[in-house]
Image (cartoon, rainbow, N blue to C red):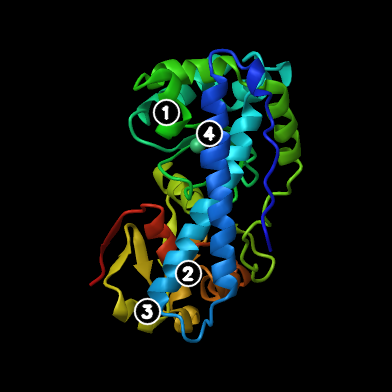
Amino acid sequence: MRYQLKQIHCRPYTLNGLSLQLIESHYENNYGGALRKLNAITEQLASLDYAKTPGYVLNGLKKDEIVALNSTLLHELYFASLGGDGQPTPGMAEALARDFGSYQKWKAEFRALACALGGGSGWVLLAWVPRDGRLVNQYASDHSQCVAGGIPILAIDMYEHAYHMDFGANAPAYVDTFLRNVNWAGVEGLYEDAGRVAPPRPLVQEEFGDLPGLGVEDVREMMNSGKPVQLIDARPRHFVSRQQDIAEGATWRDPERVKEWMGELSKADPVVVYCAYGFHVGCKTAITLREAGFDASYMKVGHSGWKAAGGPVRMHS
Ligand SMILES: [Fe+2]
């Protein structure tokens, strides 16, 4: 395929404090250059015999491809970010207030991030993250670093080619000028479109039985509340012999022999069972205990999840 050059989105002669010469050079040399490079790389990739191409050649081309591809996408967004009066629309002011506290707070962060790239190179992007349903400011030190799954809706180019001709090394003056030219109506349009992108499907594990599982935080809260909790580590024997640690406050019991040890537990206090990763062993053990009349539940994420969440452990003797 051949990537097509897009017309410059803003009208360069309407920009306040950014010269025609700067914007034209940026569009023709840097955006156009990235697009020409992207097409050349694409052509070269299409001509490769993958069975005979050394890995380093392929890696190099694919790295250059992502840099050139993102450069074209981000430059198109950059030119579309300009051409306004810098005054946020009510809709965007509200969205920024929700996620940053206020428009002013967002602006302070965005401006500081951009100025911090002065003298170097990179991008600062305002991006929507569908998974979290919120806006974030992200920094990127080159064209290839974007939030995975994020949708950029406003971009400032901090490569020197974006300002040196007009501002010399005075990056903050360029950033302020950029902010005075932001096309917030355009940003709001992109924001609306981004908001319609469905978040990725949640990654949920299959539940075993009808028993609802507890999270690590739920269990730690129960334990910290001072009420007695009987925490049972029911990892299969071969797991425990391989791993030396056990959650603080837990007692290991062999899940194969639950009928033998359940009599040592109290029916008056809650029991929480977990296994290695929160799959069926812990759940099955909790179900057996419930059927015997215990107030038992299981911790969904298991021993690994307890540690991943920073839960305290001790050596298992
Ligand atoms: Fe650029």
Label 1 residue SS: helix
Residue 272 pos. (x, y %): 49, 61
Label whose residue precedes the other's in the sequence (3 or 2): 3
Q: Nearer the viewer, residue 277 or 89?
A: 89
Mark 4 neighbour class, 10 Å CA radius: few under 14, some 14 to 19, many 20 or more: some
Residue 257 pos. (x, y %): 46, 83
Which residue is label 4 attached to?
26
Q: Is mark 4 within 8 Å of ligand 1?
A: yes
Label whose residue precedes the other's in the sequence (4 or 3): 4
Mark 1 neighbour class, 10 Å CA radius: few under 14, some 14 to 19, many 20 or more: many
Query: Residue drawn at (58%, 50%), measured in percent from left and top?
Result: 35
Label 4 residue SS: helix
Residue type at mark 3: give it: Phe
Which residue is label 1 attached to?
113
Q: Nearer the viewer, mark 3 or mark 1?
A: 1
Label whose residue precedes the other's in the sequence (4 or 2): 4
Instruction: State the image quarter where residue 154 is shown.
Output: top right
Q: Are marks 3 and 1 in contact (CB under 8 Å)?
A: no
